[in-house]
Image: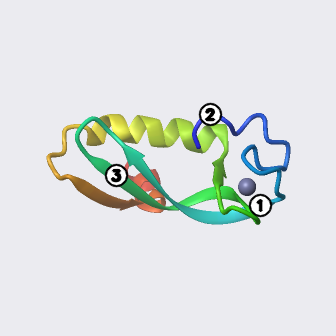
Amino acid sequence: MIGEHEKHNGHCALCGGRLEPDQLAIIPFVLESAVVIVRDVPAEICRNCKEPYMTGAVTDRITQLLRQLRTLHTEVTVVSYTTLKEAV
Ligand SMILES: [Zn+2]
């Protein structure tokens, strides 16, 4: 899911399906001892298998934010990308 975004060229790396641009995805990120579910992530989503692809800038920002969230002691956290954007 992460790190494939530069290569897809409009097609899904998993199934070759076409990507639908300008979508909002819900993407779970697994940390060491917790799961953070990020909603409203700008992404391209495969029409066939629904795999979301984020742009590099979005991935960078989320990675940065997950680093901060590592101090949380909640097992499952749900955040909105829009909220995160404003908080930094
Ligand atoms: Zn696909």
Upstream in the sequence, badge 1 or badge 3? 1
Work out how far the residue at label 2 is from the one at label 1, CA to CA, in angstroms. Answer: 17 Å
Which label's residue is closer to the chain start, 3 or 2? 2
Q: Residues within 10 Å of mark 2 (few under 14, many from 20)?
A: few
- Secondary structure under badge 3? strand
Residue type for callout 2: Gly
Judging by the rendered image, the residue that carries numbered circle 2 is 3
Q: Is residue 16 left or right of residue 2?
A: right
Say how the picture is coloured. rainbow
> To which quarter of the image does residue 50 belong?
bottom right
- How far apart are the two marked residues, 3 and 2, measured between alpha carbons? 18 Å
Quadrant (top left, top right, bottom left, bottom right) of the C terminus? top left
Kind of residue sitting beneath label 1: Pro
Q: In which quarter of the view is residue 63 placed?
A: top left
Q: Which residue is mark 1?
A: 21
- Which residue is label 3 attached to? 36
- Residue 35: image tag: none
Q: Which residue is at a point 75% across and 43% down the rendered structure image? A: 13
Q: Is mark 3 within 8 Å of ligand 1?
A: no
Expressed as whole percent of the image width and height from the top left, the position of residue 59 reads 56, 40
For this rendering, which residue is in front, 3 or 80? 3
- Dot 1 falls on a residue whose secondary structure is strand
* Callout 3 crowding tier (Cα within 10 Å): few <14, some 14–19, many ≥20: many
Disc 2 element: loop
Q: In 3D space, how far apart are the residues under numbered discs 1 and 3 (Cα atoms)?
A: 24 Å
Residue 79 horizontal side relative to residue 2, left or right: left
- At horizontal 67% and vertical 65% (from top left) the residue drawn is 23
Question: In this rendering, would 42 be left or right of 11?
Answer: left
Image height of 53 relative to 48, above or below: above
Q: Looking at the picture, how far across and down is residue 28, in whole percent?
A: 43, 53
Task: State the count of labels.
Answer: 3
